[in-house]
Image: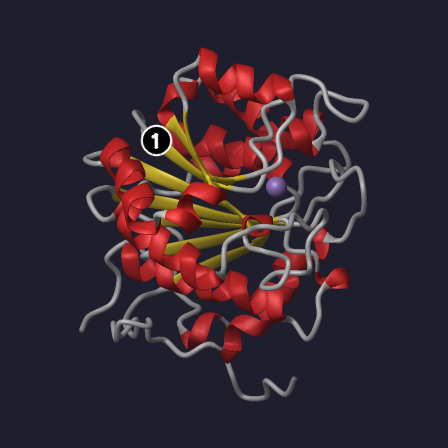
Amino acid sequence: MNLDGLRPWAGLAGGSPETAGVVVAGIAYDGSAVYRKGAAQAPQRIRSLSAAIPPVTEDGRLLTGLQVADLGDLDPGTDIEAGWSTVADRLSHIPPAAFLTVLGGDHCTFISTLAAQVKRHPGLAVLWVDAHPDLCDFSRGGRWTCGCALRRALDVSGLDPGRVVIAGGRDYDPEELDFIAANGMLLVSAQELAHEPVRAAVRIGDRLAGQKVHVSFDIDALDPAFAPGTEIPSSGGLSTRQALDLLAVATERATLVGLDIVEVSPPFDHGDITTFAALKLIFEVWGMAGYGKR
Ligand SMILES: [Mn+2]
């Protein structure tokens, strides 16, 4: 793709983390991926192709004037168990007024992201959009593998599990369903979202209304037809259109304070369609967060 003369983030890149409306950081780590690696390449690919996106959301909000400060990639080392806190510490010093946008990496990068967001925004709620809850205490040979991402993030951040809503779920371990029920978590499955999209999204919106919300979006929430470039393709997922509409309705009455997009895996992508789906989600969520003018 010829991106000559174009600047990253739709030309909005610039400014300092102290004054920018949006602060972007990559976590190029896929050490917790069990099946196949590749998500470590996502931050650079997303950043590179961000130059091809226009600074206008689909509902006509002009993002020109928004400053996007990109910190580059933060390094947790080769082991997230040892390295999550270094990255969390860096992220937690970003002024709370900035909308944090983190580019994974596998979903265990969320351990750093959530630890920082809980410090930046006490009382936070989380909308976890994913085919998988990642709530196993032990999975695929370890406690810091991707099937444990949300469970470990809750452990280290101290966030009450009842403040997390899971949307788009369809692949579970029995232990995860037990944890969800025992902790009063709301799970809205991909099936429910497809069957009654507005009603299901409003149910999530009711739970998030009036809250400060961080969205953690695993690209495998989308059907592999829309996002093939990911570690574990999971059939029966959302279309990109359904995901955008879900996010808009579910967060309409909330205050969006951050987004992380994880599990984009460029080596398994086709013609960059997964990376472009991630970019569409990022720019539209910035619009939903209130940036841009009509
Ligand atoms: Mn997943």
> Hey, which quadrant is residue 82 in on the image?
top right
Q: How many marks are shown on the rendered structure?
A: 1
Left/right of residue 37 with respect to residue 198 in the rendered view: right
Most extreme residue toward the front, as rendered? 195
Residue 155 visible: no
Q: Residue at x 51, y 32 (%)?
A: 89
Residue 199: x and y in percent read 28, 44
Q: Residue at x 75, y 32 (%)?
A: 79
**59, above or below 20, in the image:** below
Placement of the N terminus among the 4 image quadrants? bottom right
Comparing 183 with 151, the one in front is 183
Question: Secondary structure under badge 1?
Answer: strand
**9, above or below 205, in the image:** below
Residue 134: x and y in percent read 60, 30
Colouring scheme, one of rainbow, by chain, secondary structure, one colour: secondary structure
Residue 186: x and y in percent read 39, 27
For badge 1, the amino acid type reads Ala
Q: Residue at x 33, y 71 (%)?
A: 57
Left/right of residue 223 with respect to residue 117 in the rendered view: right
Left/right of residue 69 with respect to residue 267 in the rendered view: left
Disc 1 designates what residue?
125
Left/right of residue 79 with respect to residue 56 in the rendered view: right
**77, above or below 3, in the image:** above
Residue 129: x and y in percent read 48, 43
Q: Residue at x 31, y 66 (%)?
A: 66
Residue 129 visible: yes
Placement of the C terminus among the 4 image quadrants? bottom left
**24, above or below 189, in the image:** below
User: Image quadrant of ligand 1?
Assistant: top right
| Structural crowding at the residue carrying mark 1, measured as other residues with C-alpha within 10 Å and reported as few (<14), some (14–19) or many (≥20) | many
